[in-house]
Image (tube, helix red, strand yellow):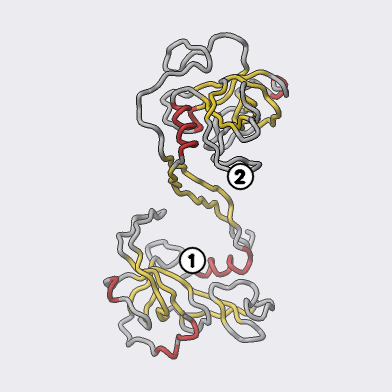
Amino acid sequence: MSEVLTAPLVVEFPFTRSLGPVQSAFLTGLRDRTVLGVRASDGRVIVPPTEYDPVTAEEIRDLVEVGATGTVTTWAWNPAPRRGQPLGTPFAWVLVRLDGADTALLHALDAPGPDSVRTGMRVRVRWAAGRTGAITDIACFEPDDGTPERDPEGESAQAGEAGESGEAPVTGITTHARLDYTYAPGRTQSRYLKALAERRTIGERCPSCRKVYVPPRGACPTCGVATDTQVEVGPRGTVTTYCIVNIKARHSANDIEVPYVYAHIALDGADLALHARIGGIPYDQVRMGLRVEPVWTEGGRFPDHYRPTGEPDADYDSYKELI
C-alpha cells in the first residue's frame, strides 16, 4: 500500500447572478427560439452578445437577430463526454458563425464521428424542449441537410422561426458549478490523516526554530527548512479565536443547525492553531481561552467537533501568540 493517500473530492455550489439588459435579451430570445447578437461600433455583429464593445469598451445595446443556421469555423472531437456536458455520446466541440453574425459561438455538434465534421460545414440549432432561458436552450447543433427542422415540442417549424412566449423576461440565472478531482495530500499530510484515523494528532517540529506545526506541512513556514520529526500533540487545546456561523451550509454527512461556532484551536504542544467546530455548549457561551477536547463519532476518521473540558479558561498570555 502506498504511504500517500488519495481521495476523490467534489467542490460544488450554485452561483446566482443577475443579468443586464443585453444578456437578459439574449437568454429570453433563446427561450423563444431566437438568437440575438449585438452590433459593435465598427458594425460587426457579436454573438453571444457582449455589454461592452471589445475594441472601444463603450457600452453597446443595439440588438440584432441572427440566423439559427451557420458555418463551422473550427472544431475538436470529444470522444469521451463527461458529466454535465451537452451530449452523452461522443460529439464535436465547434465554433459556429451564425448567419448574420461576425463572431463564432461555442457549442456542441451532434455528429456520428470525427470523419463527418469539417471546417466550413453548414449546421443548424437543435432547440431543447422545455426551454427556460439559458444557453442550454440550444441543445446542440446538428448538420444542416436542408430538411425542415422539427420543434422539440412537436410542431413542425423552420429553423430560426420563433414566437413570443408571453412569459416575463429572464433577469437572472443560477449556474451549478462543480469540480471533480482526485486529491493527494502528500506524504506528510498522509501520515497526519492516518494518525487522525487512530485518534491521534501529530505535528512536525522545525529543527531550526523548534516550533511544532499542526497540521504538518513538510517544511517550516517561518524558516523554510524541511521538517521530519513527528510530535504527538493534544488532544486537548485552547480556543484562540472564533466566529459564529449564521448561514446554513450543506455538509456531506449531515446538516448542522445554525448558529454554530467555528474556532481556531491551539492544541497542547502545538505552535499553530487549527480550525474546528465547537459543540456541547451554547454558541453564545464560546469564548477565547475556552479549554476543549475532541469528540469522535463511531467510525469517524477525524474529530466531529470539540467540546469544553470543564477546565478553567487558559490565561491569555499562554495563547496570545497563536491568535
Q: Is residue 239 above or below residue 258?
A: below
Q: Nearer the viewer, residue 49 or 39?
A: 39
N-terminal of the pair, mark 1 or mark 2, is 2
Q: Are marks 1 and 2 in contact (CB under 8 Å)?
A: no
Query: Which-is-in-front pick, marks 1 and 2?
Result: 2
Q: Horizontal and vertical percent for residue 286?
A: 32, 76
Q: Horizontal and vertical percent for residue 190?
A: 58, 65
State the residue at coordinates (56%, 32%).
38
Q: Which residue is mark 2?
A: 57
Quarter of the figure with the N terminus: bottom right
* Left or right of residue 281, residue 178 in this image: right
The label shown at residue 197 is 1
Q: Horizontal and vertical percent for residue 263?
A: 40, 72
Q: Nearer the viewer, residue 77 or 66?
A: 66
State how far apart marks 1 and 2 are (Cα): 56 Å
Residue 94 quadrant: top right
State the residue at coordinates (53%, 16%).
159
Q: Residues within 10 Å of mark 1 (few under 14, many from 20)?
A: some
State the residue at coordinates (44%, 74%).
264
Quick one: SS at disc 2?
A: loop
Residue 304 quadrant: bottom left
